[in-house]
Image: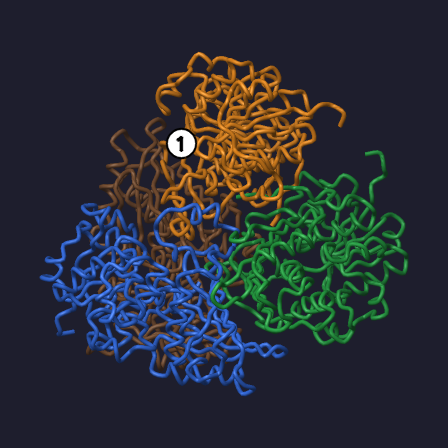
Chain colours: A blue, B green, C orange, D brown
Amino acid sequence: MTHKPIRAVVVGGTGYTGAELVRLARSHPSLELTTIVGNTTAGEPIDKVLPSLQGVMSGDVQPFDPDAIAQDADVAFCALPHAASAEAVSALRQRGVPVLDLSADFRFYDLAVYEAWYGKHPVPELLNAAVYGLVELHREEIRGADLIAVPGCYPTASTLALAPLIERGLIKHEGIVVDAKSGVSGAGRALSSATHFPEVGEGVRAYKAGAHRHGPEIEQELARLAGAPVRVTFVPHLVPMSRGILATCYAQPSSASATAEACTLAARALYEGSPSVHVLEVGEHPDTLWVRGSNRVHVAYTQDPSSGTIVAMSAIDNLVKGASGQAIQCLNVRFGLDEGAGLGATAQWP
Amino acid sequence: MTHKPIRAVVVGGTGYTGAELVRLARSHPSLELTTIVGNTTAGEPIDKVLPSLQGVMSGDVQPFDPDAIAQDADVAFCALPHAASAEAVSALRQRGVPVLDLSADFRFYDLAVYEAWYGKHPVPELLNAAVYGLVELHREEIRGADLIAVPGCYPTASTLALAPLIERGLIKHEGIVVDAKSGVSGAGRALSSATHFPEVGEGVRAYKAGAHRHGPEIEQELARLAGAPVRVTFVPHLVPMSRGILATCYAQPSSASATAEACTLAARALYEGSPSVHVLEVGEHPDTLWVRGSNRVHVAYTQDPSSGTIVAMSAIDNLVKGASGQAIQCLNVRFGLDEGAGLGATAQWP
Amino acid sequence: MTHKPIRAVVVGGTGYTGAELVRLARSHPSLELTTIVGNTTAGEPIDKVLPSLQGVMSGDVQPFDPDAIAQDADVAFCALPHAASAEAVSALRQRGVPVLDLSADFRFYDLAVYEAWYGKHPVPELLNAAVYGLVELHREEIRGADLIAVPGCYPTASTLALAPLIERGLIKHEGIVVDAKSGVSGAGRALSSATHFPEVGEGVRAYKAGAHRHGPEIEQELARLAGAPVRVTFVPHLVPMSRGILATCYAQPSSASATAEACTLAARALYEGSPSVHVLEVGEHPDTLWVRGSNRVHVAYTQDPSSGTIVAMSAIDNLVKGASGQAIQCLNVRFGLDEGAGLGATAQWP
Amino acid sequence: MTHKPIRAVVVGGTGYTGAELVRLARSHPSLELTTIVGNTTAGEPIDKVLPSLQGVMSGDVQPFDPDAIAQDADVAFCALPHAASAEAVSALRQRGVPVLDLSADFRFYDLAVYEAWYGKHPVPELLNAAVYGLVELHREEIRGADLIAVPGCYPTASTLALAPLIERGLIKHEGIVVDAKSGVSGAGRALSSATHFPEVGEGVRAYKAGAHRHGPEIEQELARLAGAPVRVTFVPHLVPMSRGILATCYAQPSSASATAEACTLAARALYEGSPSVHVLEVGEHPDTLWVRGSNRVHVAYTQDPSSGTIVAMSAIDNLVKGASGQAIQCLNVRFGLDEGAGLGATAQWP
């Protein structure tokens, strides 16, 4: 490649999302991840904080310095917790740095919804400038955006499974259920008894059933497609694996012609030209293992012959298409690169 | 104990259900498991076939001899595949042996439903004599029964979660969804690529979505309580753990008074006097790890405040309350013992 | 049973060892666990702290009150961290309460060895009164002891595998290697990145290779049998499972007659009358899954035909025979009960 | 790249090694994997046989046709079982096709050793033509070789950990122990109760202790470096994870100057210029998770201060550096490409 690479920094880069951004950037033809910023680990060698980088990447974790970033970097990834992220994003945007934000801070169109779930927003005036970074549904807006709110794992898996059905009017807007199963890395690197190995292994459980922050985010994106409110009951579960999300979605058909085949065709139509999405045949079931380590999404549709209920399923790797891979996909679109640049890796199976 | 123990044989006892029957029988005060019958392993030392029995139980696996069983045993557990089980049960019933059958062969009230899902029934004339062995819902019938059709893991978890809501009229009979997550031992000991460790670890997937044999069995039991047809969309999933089932069930409330609290009260009322069932508080979520190795069922109810959808959850150990423990619970009731005899073990956590 | 049960309290009972003591005590015919003492959780409902006890055991975690214990209990289990345990033990012994201590505080015969590895001993004057609670090797001493230092998982597995070979003079005292593989529950309930699910799953690693505190404890017990110093290189590993320890031990034969068969015979002789130990045939390999949830030990011996190296293997459940089961086994012996009382449970397989 | 890519076929490509060759080849700048040959699955769509290839690679599995391969391919990977592989290799070599063979058939210098462990060799006359494909130790020979015997996971991990110590004379040639822990994918895709999920999860066990075929292979490579016989006791273990091998090796120092620091320096010297190997600091311990999905090897050395025993540890991904990545590394050297071409991927952590 003869072009100068895009120089990026990752703010909050010492968690799993950061490790994955480093991994993906290293095999990207036009992206150079120059600096990793971390608050609590600033000054520590990056390969001690992220042990997979031993012998691969050297240097220390850096403190957050927005002026230095504005000078040295073409773009910043922000992978901080919500609220903290908004502050950093604001500092970077004031200095003109394009930002791919992986927090929830700029994902909502409606400030009131954000504040109902996350508390007071530090910089609400930036909300209007943000674009929702699900490339398959917001490709055009992302091209011109300087603040892209990259959605997380649950909304990505759920929305991509249901979007074709909503867009084509195949399902009713009420009574939708999303039963999602997540690997434990989705909970991040912060320690908790809920992620302590002996209390996770050999166990599966729901959490925040019907009351998780990602429910309204899924509803927002589906409502936008529907042009009308959509109600989703969202129940996340933790399963004893490190990576992967499977979303099993249930909806009532809007008419007798809303068959599994019709859903499959709708998805093929909507995702034509979307290199990350693969629509399985009717009767096939996605498996998170089949996409592990890749930016791919497997979706599939079936129908209960007796009740008529439509079952829409999707599998992603929560740290790739559900976080860091998606952020790079947004960057590719924003900077006019090939959408799949650096994201072509085949899943690691088994 | 001064009474003579009940002498039992287990036919088809060299799989996981058999191993678990041996384990549970050994800590039962009034049950003696005298013989393990196995077709393909007859003549092999039982502690080579079931390695946890090394130094614990000796003797060889026996061929099936119904006359010997009739002479030596007070009762037989049958843990054979469907159809094969019906043949063995028939032979044993002809000789007057009471049978606890863990196959699907005698679980359906309607021969047509059985034959739609399992094929031709070998001994349909026995169907009427059978009682469905879910003690919490069929306690009285089981007392006098000589052929008890012990339900398996999915119907047990699903039915116990939903039964109180149906019985009290709290939910509608249409649009019910059961999204169940099972450990791999539920698939039994037969080898398959679907249960090969490298293709299971780090993966979660649905299978037979909306088309699994256990769907109509759940519908049958709920319809019996409802006195009317009930429609359930049943989607089982495999998760990378050995034991446990979590059923997450979704239903529409029949009225505004059908709250999570009302569901919880309904469950407490229905399961009063049922030593195996524990109803969690509203806001709590069951975890399969919390019941692992025990005959206990944890159920809990919550409600999506925005859509109103009721979420009913239950966790069991698929090999205990979902198979062998349940069979022993039936035996206890049938033989007039304390319902929880030999089943009081606390879960192994972690 | 017509005798009054033995009333026990567990101090530090809100970790995994405590949960397991409750589980085992509940199926013990002569032991009643009346009180669970916990420092940081005093006042909380016990079934919230130990979720497997929901619907099984009620009441709150109690603060430590040695006078109350002296009044109400016949014996105390101490499951506190080292040093803290010694203080509690001292308070209980001053009041005449027999103590089964699961910490390291009273396991060493030589104060200097303790202090080299654990720091200053709070009550060194109690060291002489303590007996090492490995029943298979210290049965007689335990009968009369009021302070029993129950060994942990690694020393139990390692010592039981090697003891017969040392006792019969079958192996050299130098060049012994113990390569141990532990499930993660062995690290306890304290949170750490080393036990955070995503950093444990799909990984295996050694830790503190050749420098772990349990090395000198194994050497102490083998030296006692040898009547001479014994050198062991002890390397523990963490493997992605919740329970179980496998110790693979390597030693040089002392003569040509020290074959795998001779080792097997030595083990059968030493462990005759020890209900917890089962010696496999030459050529068999123990598996931690085969003893999971039980107080059993599987040991086996083989020999490398070309180098002559003896391989001694043992498998235990780290929380049962490696902790709580062993403590109850000691209690049984101390109180003149059957050694296996309450410990007869068959392993949960699978 | 302006050069024509190297066109490769993989014979026996429908197992895990084949899937991994496809994955790695797809991100290789100069390698094109054109054809996947499989015996039992010939004619089936490749993305049904290898589900991670859905939407990524199409076409059917092909039958073995050495003439077609000779015409269309520049090189063949053979990933067949031993003996079958030798037959295919022979057919390909007769047609002049360079072969990277992943079976054991051409790894031994001494026919007698091969036949003692694997039975009669189908084409012993080819043995002399083969080069052992461990690039770090055979780089020069591989450059000119047309038959490269790519070693498997255990010998790779074990030999790379011990080679520097043998080469520098730091350890004695007797009394070496290799205690290796493998993920289950190392056992391949063939079904067996030993790899059935419920009998693997929550268990760890040795197998073929001191009698595994890879022992003599490790001895061969170390003896070559030593210029004298070397004795290794090799004991493999299965641990409940899909990928990864950790080899923990124990050896006696040849002199007082053979410290952990000396071992570390020896490894740094030997592996200077080897891009796949990273030598950790003394006191660090490799973790298979830190290299998962990469072609990297982490090695580390420590010493038991009391016994003097040297502990050499190494971690690899068994399917990458232990199989397919190593084969591509050999191909790179053989065809004059950069040794790390296509192998630079960072490990997937977590």
Q: Nearer the viewer, residue C152 or A328?
A: A328
Where is residue A144? Give x, y as percent.
20, 77
Give me the residue at 79% from left, 49% from top: B333
Subunit bearing disc 1 = C
Label 1 crowd bin: few (<14), some (14–19), many (20+), radius 10 Å: many
Give me the residue at 13% from left, 74% from top: A2
The answer to whether residue A341 is above or below residue B26 is below
Q: Nearer the viewer, residue D63 or A286?
A: A286
Where is residue A255? Give x, y as percent.
54, 85
Q: Nearer the viewer, residue B57 or C30?
A: C30
**Image quadrant where residue A114 sits:** bottom left
Furthest-bottom residue in this view: A257
Q: Nearer the viewer, residue A74 or A46?
A: A74
Numbered-mark total: 1
Secondary element type, mark 1: strand
Furthest-left residue in this view: A71
Res B24 visible: yes
Where is residue D106? Give x, y as percent.
40, 60
> From the viewer's perspective, is B227 left or right of D200?
right
- What residue type is disc 1 on? Thr
Badge 1 is on which residue? C233
> From the viewer's perspective, is C323 left or right of D109?
right
> From the viewer's perspective, is D343 left or right of A271?
left
Res D191 visible: no
Furthest-front residue in this view: B257
Q: Quadrant of the N terminus of chain D?
A: bottom left
Q: Quadrant of the C terminus of chain D?
A: bottom left
Give me the residue at 46% from left, 41% from top: C181
Give me the residue at 22% from left, 61% from top: A123
Where is residue B74? Give x, y as percent.
85, 48
